[in-house]
Amino acid sequence: MLDYKLLQALAAVVEEGGFERAARTLGLSQSAVSQRIKLLESRVGAPVLLRAMPPAPTETGRKLLNHVQQVRLLERDLQRDVPMDDETDAAPRLRIALNADSLATWWAGAVAELCEDQNLLLELLVDDQDVGLRRMRAGEVAGCVCATEQPVAGARSLPLGAMRYLAVASPAFMARHFAEGVSPAALRRAPAIVYGPDDRLQHRFLAGCDFTERFPHHLCPSSEGFVRLIDAGLGWGLVPALQIRSELAAGSLQEVLPGHQVDVPLYWHYWRNGGRLLEALTHQLARTVLQ
């Protein structure tokens, strides 16, 4: 039998990003948390953490964290069905990884009713849609929204539709950089806005226009800030069509190349044995189809 106090320590260290914060969360000393991790490694016969900053789970650690995630969800179901002396009235909380653009557009409307009905709290971890599945693989989250269809072991994936991205810029930027059209020479000079090092949307768009050279770009890891930079004329960038309908209608933003867009498929990944709460969230998302 696994000692769940030891697994709880492992989960806390990974989720809190360090031993000190894990100790505060668990109400233990940092030394006590470290001892629990060492005891867990002794019992499973393998390291469970890479002592990095922040600590990262090993392959064995990931398997244990995946197990912890599913046990937590199943215990919530059991507490509702079987009276327990230590049962509390604390609202359930789900850790979910999703991309910033989903958070800025459709996510809130899709889950608001369920959160109200189930008294559900969410802890949202923002990652690029191309890398969000790392959180599932590491056992850090109960579910994630990402652009990858293939689920990790023990999980399922549900297609949510595709998010359409348009290349846009302010009228002033268009006049300054693309007055004579969107040419390779203009693209070499015109700065773009890129969300982060893992964001390849602009590259994908340009490849579709037969442009594969390097281009100047700002880095802006904020969905709302991304649009503000474009609106201020600092660069052009790929933005969800859902996010800029009013700006396009008003003419404050313009498409760089009308008729050219990038469609990014999104998938909801969730644990197979995630209990009724995760099933309810999955059913809710299944009714949310991106247009």
Image: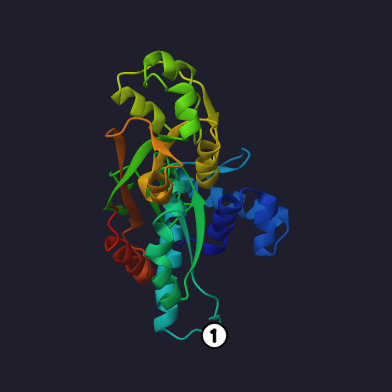
Q: Is residue 235 above or below residue 227?
A: above
Side (left or right) of 102 relative to 30: left
Mark 1, residue position: 85
Secondary structure beneath dot 1 equals loop
Side (left or right) of 222 relative to 156: right
Taking the spot 71% from the left edge, 54% from the top edge, the residue there is 30
- Locate the N terminus and report the quarter of the image it occupies: bottom left
* Of 114 and 185, the residue lying toward us: 185
Query: Could one spot residue 57 in this view of the protein?
Result: no
The number of numbered discs placed on residues in the rendered structure image is 1
The furthest residue to the top: 185
Residue 17, how many percent across, how many down?
61, 48
Side (left or right) of 27 relative to 14: right
Q: Is residue 190 above or below residue 7?
A: above
Residue 54, how many percent across, how many down?
61, 42
The amino acid pointed to by label 1 is: Asp
Q: Is residue 210 above or below residue 229?
A: above
Taking the spot 40% from the left edge, 72% from the top edge, the residue there is 113
* Of 47 and 8, the residue lying toward us: 8
Label 1 crowd bin: few (<14), some (14–19), many (20+), radius 10 Å: few
Taking the spot 42% from the left edge, 47% from the top edge, the residue there is 250
Q: Is residue 43 above or below residue 53?
A: below
Query: Could one spot residue 272 in this view of the protein?
Result: yes
